[in-house]
Amino acid sequence: MNMKYIFIIIALFLSINTWGQHAATYSRVKINLNAFHTIELLDEIGIAADHGTYLKGRHFTTDLSQVEVQLLSENGFDFEILIEDAEAWYANPNREELDLRGTGDCQPLDPVPNYPVPENFEMGSMGGYFTWQEMLAILDEMKALYPDLISTKLPIEGELTFEGRPIHWVRISDNPEADENEPEVLYTALHHSREPGSLTQLIFYMWYLLENYETDEQIRYLIDETEMYFIPCVNPDGYVYNELNNPEGGGLWRKNRFINGDGSHGVDLNRNYGYEWGHDNEGSSTNPLSETYRGTAPFSEPETRAVRDFCNEHQFQIALNYHTHGDLLVHPWSYSDSYTPDHETFSNMARAMIAENSYLAGTTSETVGYAVNGDSDDWMYGEQDSKPEILAFTPEVGASGGFWPAEDQIVPNAQKTLLMNLRTAALVHRFGIIKDNNPVVLNAQTANFYYSLQRIGLQNGPMEVRLSPISDNVNVEPESISHDLNANESIVGTFSIDLDSEIQNGDTLQFYLSLDNGSYTKGDTITKIFINNIPAFSDSGPSMDNWQIESGLWATTGTTYYSAPMSITDSPNGVYANNVEDHIVLQESIELGSAFEQAFLNFWAKWEIEPAYDYAQVAISVNSGDFIPLCGRYSKIGTDNQDEGNPLYDGFQQEWVEEMIDITEFAEPGDDIKIRFSMVSDGYLQEDGFYFDEVSIILTDNSPEGVVKPNKPFSWDLYPVPASEQLHIEIVPGFSKTSPLEMAFFDALGKIIFSEKIELSDVLHKTLDTSNWQPGFYICKISSQNQETLIKRVIITH
């Protein structure tokens, strides 16, 4: 046959094949899951379930081709087409996002972080996202504007893509054209070509670094002492293919553009890495038509070989391999359900990274719900012969909006990842997380301020904690405290604070709690309220005598609590039941008194509740009226599957948090109020439920005479804090007759270490021998027969 005709036939075949793959419309599909049709089965039949909106055991929502929709039908999945043509929907600038949450006035504690948008950051031409050429031009512009901070873009040597494109990299550092002996971190984006948000947030971060070098102490240190490497587009062929076919944005091609043996296109680059490649056929596919096709061999693709060689040539300690979407932070292992030997380090670093964006962190099975193999993170961490281990993570950017969120979501998504990016660079140095461990309300003019510090950074060395008064009505001692911790070690420390004698009830106090790692200082402003009135109600036991169970199995439990020895929960015997609407309400109404300035509901809580469906709620009733849901610092707005539009609690809050809810707008002096906690579930997933502790109603009264001095039955103090061999106790009788007191010390597990009954007639001075107590955190409770219970916390060190 004439060679000319052979080339024509080949060209026709390739164009028909390309047209056929593009012509297959992508749809937004909600796939209902059950015991037989699981997220794992989706992966087994070749449907990529690693990116999308996943509600465990219920449904998975993502964008699928017509071929994949047909696979759902053939395998008996129940599904719903939400958007018929997802690419056309993405390309519509006036589209309405499918928002899971309702609307309401209750604002979350942590909205989108308000980082300023870099002056040089502009939207791209592809629905707000950058084309490949625009990305290259931005890298050149960065070099032109900041030649001393960013290197010239270069191709990774030795590899070109199937269509002949290079894979570029740049370095941000104080000597960018030289490879110095400094800790190295790596950021990558666009392994999957339909995930442009991975690139835009990276460009946002790079501009932020460059523009703030001169003014931000931390950024200057990170650039001076770190080499930050960027591969902003791992898959240029697939990305350009989406641009050519969907120039307004919305292209949903995922893989690269390699022509497989059957004439189909593409290998999933995030299934083509060498560590545990092809471990099984569920975590990757042997079918070239599948979105998770792993290729013919490990590193069969030039893109993954380029990343491999680049890692082997460097000493990266941490890597972020960006994808979209799901608001997740995934770390190894991916190929199995087991934990790595460095699981504690992975978990602690992840917790530091997601401090602002509240991404769900964990292994692949803990986040997307099933195992995958041949991915970048497992190879970067698991391969330790050709290079050192890399602590590699995969952030999945964005919760709603699919693969191409609307243009107005580009900046918020980038702002949510900024701290994660900064802390990745910081974690290769001396780095710790400091936390305020104190209630919002201070009720004594002399008190201890407790903090916890955990070392998470990879470098050794001391770190200095400071508590600096901002308000002029407080003094703090000492000025600073230094700690030199081992890797992942935590410690609890304390400052002494003295308040001004003229302080008034309701006055606020502000401190700056900061951590100095020897090179720069980072911290947060801490705000407290001074209220030394006896609470209108206090259940610090807690005691079920104060509560009436309207429905359900509410009870005290000693398995977890904020203060020993117990808390109250809806499900004391395990997970909560299906199809419940359980309520527990105060036994007696609380009279708010004849005069107050402000009224607060205060309690500590934690919860594990199926998000978007089940929920807990706290509500107030005034003068026997209807119960009104209350908006707290940690509450969310209910979905249409919950109490839509009203504040509630769901998801996973596994550490105790303090809610301080201003109820002044609901009640006036003289009103009677009741508080109710509720737990509501449907017939699907069951989780651990809702816990609460230390419930109180606190009133402020700024009378002209100054601080209201309540007629307390007694006052007391413990010192020194921290204590070592001895702990001194001082109890001073009040103006009213004091009934016999019971004093008890509890360890962190709620076990009573020491207890004693006290007849108080005069000032009591007592010394306890604590030389045999284990170092750690203890709680002391003193109670009288009239149920007055006071709590102090103390640290024992030896």
Image (spheres, rainbow, N blue to C red):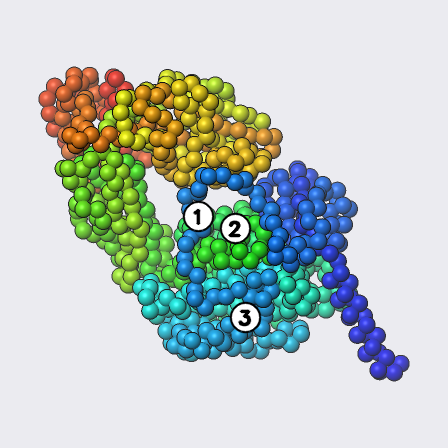
Q: Earlier in the sequence, mark 3 or mark 1?
A: 1
Camera-side residue of 89 and 223: 89
Q: Residue at x 28, y 36 (%)?
A: 441
Q: Earlier in the sequence, mark 2 or mark 1?
A: 1
| Residue under pointer 2 | 327
| Residue under pointer 3 | 135
Q: Whole-percent x and y of residue 275?
A: 57, 61
Left or right for 391, reference 771: right
Label 2 crowd (10 A; few <14 / some 14-19 / many >=20) = many
Mark 2 or 3: the one toward you? 3
Mark 2 or 1: the one toward you? 1
Whether residue 449 is situated above or below residue 175 in the rendered picture: above
- Pick the quarter of the image with the N terminus: bottom right
Q: Residue at x 18, y 37 (%)?
A: 503
How many angstroms separate mark 3 from mark 1 (CA)? 29 Å
Q: Furthest-right residue in view?
A: 1
| Residue under pointer 1 | 111
